[in-house]
Image (tube, helix red, strand yellow):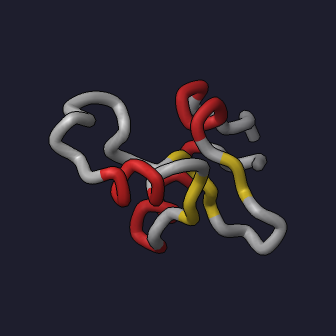
Amino acid sequence: MPKIKTKSGAKKRFRLTASGKVRGQQAGKRHMMIKRSNKFIRNARGTTILSDADAKIVKKFIPYA
């Protein structure tokens, strides 16, 4: 059987935790930052655990992670 290719964009953007959850960057910090509150910007630092629906999609992109 041939191997499944990993999506290059996904392997650069997401990592799996030890328990199998998908970790990714917080959304909403690329542009239009002036209208966002300081609280929003502060809370959007670092990484977050993706929701179950999004994680299901990403796991198909990184089959051997």
Residue 2 position in % (x across, y down): 72, 34
Quadrant for the N terminus in the image: top right
Horizontal placement of 31 versus 4: left or right? left
Judged left or right of residue 5, residue 28 is left
Give residue 33's quadrant in the image: top left
Query: Total number of numbered labels?
Result: 0
Locate residue 21 relative to residue 61 in the image: left or right: right
* Residue 48 can be seen in this image: yes
> Would you place residue 8 above or below residue 47 in this image?
above
Instruction: Identify the image quadrant of residue 35.
Output: top left
Judge whether 10 appears above or below 60 on screen.
above
- Residue 60 horizontal/vertical position (percent): 55, 52
Q: Residue furthest right?
A: 18
Residue nearest the viewer, comparing 14 with 38? 38
Q: Residue at x 58, y 37 (%)?
A: 13
Left or right: residue 42 versus residue 12 is left
Q: Position of residue 59 (x, y in %)?
A: 58, 55
Residue extending furthest front?
38
User: Does residue 5 appear in this view?
Assistant: no
Residue displayed at 57% across by 65% down: 49
In the rendered image, the residue lying farthest to the left is 35
Q: Is residue 53 above or below residue 59?
A: below
Q: Residue at x 63, y 30 (%)?
A: 12
Tell me the residue at 34%/30% (across/down).
30
Residue 25 position, x and y percent, is 53, 46
